[in-house]
Image (tube, rainbow, N blue to C red):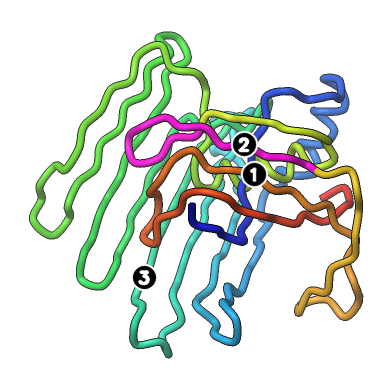
Amino acid sequence: MTTKTMILSAAVLLTFNATAQDAKLGLLLNDGEELTYKVRWNFLRLGTVVVKTERHPTDSRRYIVSMNVFSNPDLPFVDIEEYNSCVITADNVMTREYLGMWRNGSSRTEIHMSYDDSTRAITYAERDVNVGQTLKEVVLSNAEPFVNGPSLFFFTRYVAGSVGRLSVATMVDGALGKTHLDFLPQREELEVVAIPYPVRVQRYAGVAEWQGGSSAGVSGEFTGWISDDSA
């Protein structure tokens, strides 16, 4: 399996009560929040990831979270630009709608996805923008709520502080898989380039039981760290 160091997310068993959940979501879902990450591999800066949060214009219990990915223009061997946008619910951070617009070199792909609570159906459509051809159309019936892309990112923050293995349904390339996380009880300090002092963090490790997603493609084992604070 491929080993990745990244931020992913998962959960089905939460140990805090509903009031605590609402309070935590109130800290995480902030209209206008913008987080910027510089992505590095060894000494190379591969690109930039920008995550934004906006309150839904017509539904106060939903938010629009987006994840923009830009490769480093100084690198000749990678040319990636992505826009990923999720409409998520404020009660459990699950995906209700998704739009993805990906460019990898000259290739351009557009993805639409939605979840219907009443029928528990997921619809997924993937299109080659350059030729106007539908590449994949999928309808999944009796499907459980799921996360993907930006909602995975926010679910990690949501369940931080848990201990033990958590799992969540994850939608990737028109198929449902599972993401498993093992949150460790120990806390440690981690040096971060953007902050002039060590940050107290919780480490987690797990397995992505799916393959694909985004231009780079991900699968297998991963490790992540998340700050041990209210955000």
- Disc 2 marks a residue whose amino acid type is His
The percent coordinates of residue 163 (x first, y second) are 83, 35
Secondary structure under the numbered disc 2 in the rendered image = strand
Residue at image location 65% in from the left, 61% down from the top: 34
**Residue 206 - label:** 1
x, y percentage for residue 184?
Answer: 83, 44
The reply to whether callout 1 and callout 2 are in contact (CB within 8 Å) is: yes
Location of residue 19 by image quarter:
top right
Label 2, label 3: how many angstroms apart (C-alpha)?
Answer: 28 Å
- Is 93 included in the stretch rendered in magenta? no
Q: Give left or right: position of 121 versus 136.
A: right
The answer to whether marks 2 and 3 mark residues whose Cβ atoms lie closer than 8 Å is: no
* Left or right, residue 25 beside residue 181: right
Identify the mark nearer the N-term, 2 or 3. Answer: 3
What's the CA distance linking mark 1 and mark 3? Answer: 26 Å
* Residue under pointer 3: 80
Q: Residue 180 carries which label?
A: 2
Q: What residue type is labelled 1?
A: Gly
Determine if the magenta segment contains residue 173. Answer: yes
Bounds of the magenta segment:
170-183
